[in-house]
Amino acid sequence: TGLGAATGANLTLDSNGLVETSLGGTRVFINGNPAPLTYAGAGQVNAVVPYEVAPDTSANVVVVYQGNASAPFAIPIAPARPGIFTHSGGGTGQGAVLNQDQSVNSASSPAARSSWISLYATGEGITTPPGMDGRVSAYKGAPLPKAQAACLATIGGHTANVNYCGEAPYFTAGVLQVNVQVPDSISPGSSVPVTITVGGVISQANVTIAVQ
């Protein structure tokens, strides 16, 4: 409680086009590094862990609202910890997925077998080239940062081809896009399970896509 204003504030960009680290009077520091904020309200703050925070450690987090700092609390930091975004926002059910034709995957708009889909996730860890905190990615000729760790995927329990695993264009750094081919051997359905694995760590269970 008391993490921010009663009316939540959404992501804004600073004069350099980077995601603000101060939002509605709220700031978050992770091992002393200011974290980009995508939402800040009285009961919830969404922050992106800065790239400067070393993996395989425990990091101290402090939330500051209108100059008043919380007591530090510790969180574990892993080299990678993939999590697929979902429509519900709760981490289960229909995944945040675009079909090959850029339509939103759903029961009424399923992906075709053998087609390519884009999964949206987070937790890829260190990238090559190095990621920049708060940057909004865009196609401008320069290569997009890709996950250093190996990236795998399964759909319906079958191994799926991956041809891209890196920063999602037009999103803030920390949003991962994984382009995956739907295996033609799987059974169709509106709730086909999907997972990604980054650096040997598998994403959460009970995330699904629709396949025709």
Image (cartoon, rainbow, N blue to C red):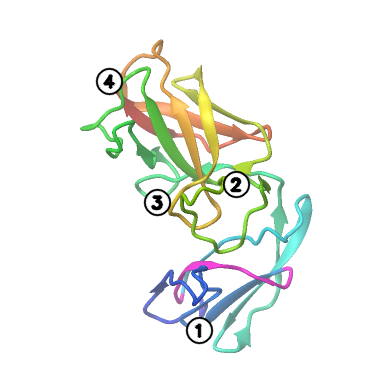
Type of the residue with mark 3: Gly
**Residue, disc 3:** 89
Type of the residue with mark 2: Pro
Type of the residue with mark 1: Gly
- Residue 174 vertical placement versus 21 (above, below): above
Type of the residue with mark 4: Gln
First in sequence: mark 3 vs mark 2: 3
> Residue visible at 27% across and 38% down?
103
Q: Residue furthest top?
A: 185
Camera-nearest label, 2 or 4: 2
Proximity of marks 2 and 4: CB atoms separated by less than 8 Å: no
Task: Please rate how many residues cluster around mark 4, counting C-alpha atoms within 10 Å: few if below 14, some from 14 to 19, many from 20.
Answer: some
How far apart in space, not on screen, are marks 2 and 4 (Cα)? 32 Å
Disc 4 on helix, strand or loop? Answer: loop
**Residue, disc 4:** 212
**Disc on res. 42:** none
Task: Please rate how many residues cluster around mark 3, counting C-alpha atoms within 10 Å: few if below 14, some from 14 to 19, many from 20.
Answer: few
First in sequence: mark 2 vs mark 4: 2
- Residue 98 vertical placement versus 61 (above, below): above
Pick the front one: 207 or 37: 37
**Residue, disc 2:** 145
How far apart in space, not on screen, are marks 4 and 1 (Cα)? 47 Å
Find residue 141 and report its horizontal and vertical position in percent. 51, 48
> Residue visible at 41% across and 21% down?
182
Find residue 206 and report its horizontal and vertical position in percent. 45, 34
How far apart in space, not on screen, are marks 3 and 4 (Cα)? 24 Å
